[in-house]
Amino acid sequence: MDKVVRMSSEKGVVIVSKSSCCLSYAVQVLFQDLGVHPVHEIDKDPDCREIEKALMRLGCSTPVPAIFVGGKLVGSTNEVMSMHLSGSLVPLVKPFQANLC
């Protein structure tokens, strides 16, 4: 769990994903379009199983994708897409956007 906490607090936005997950890909594309590029693919991490278990203990219904903003767990695909449709996602990630000028 320490690795997940450290990873989520080191960057403003972190998407914990797997390279083979289509939902992870969809969330990554959304965040890239918003100017945020915060992906950590756990299937390339030797601690993959431990990270999955830690994410489940933190309350993720599925281990990936898990999205953290400002060190806090936002949720998975459903929560992020709901936030985006309601207009609350952009203001949340705005402080972490790359300069898109």
Image: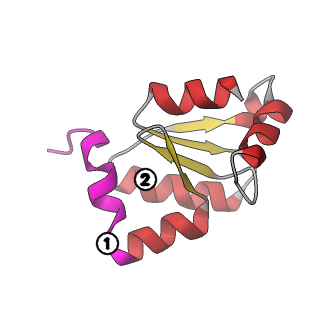
Q: Which mark is residue 87?
A: 1
Closer to viewer: mark 1 or mark 2: 1
| Residue at 25% in and 43% down | 95
Q: Position of residue 47 (x, y in %)?
A: 80, 25
Q: Which residues are magenta?
A: 86-101
Residue at position x 74%, y 30% in the image: 44
The image shows residue 7, relative to residue 31, as above or below, that is above
Whether residue 26 is situated above or below residue 45 in the rendered picture: below
Residue 31 badge: 2
Mark 2 surroundings within 10 Å by alpha-carbon count, few (fewer than 14), some (14 through 19), many (20 or more): many
x, y percent for residue 19: 70, 45
Of 11 and 27, nearer the camera is 11
Q: In the orientation shown, which residue stands out farthest toward the left?
A: 101
Whole-number angstrom distance, CA of label 1 to CA of label 2: 14 Å
Identify residue type, mark 1.
Answer: Gly
Left or right: 67 as drawn, with respect to 21: left
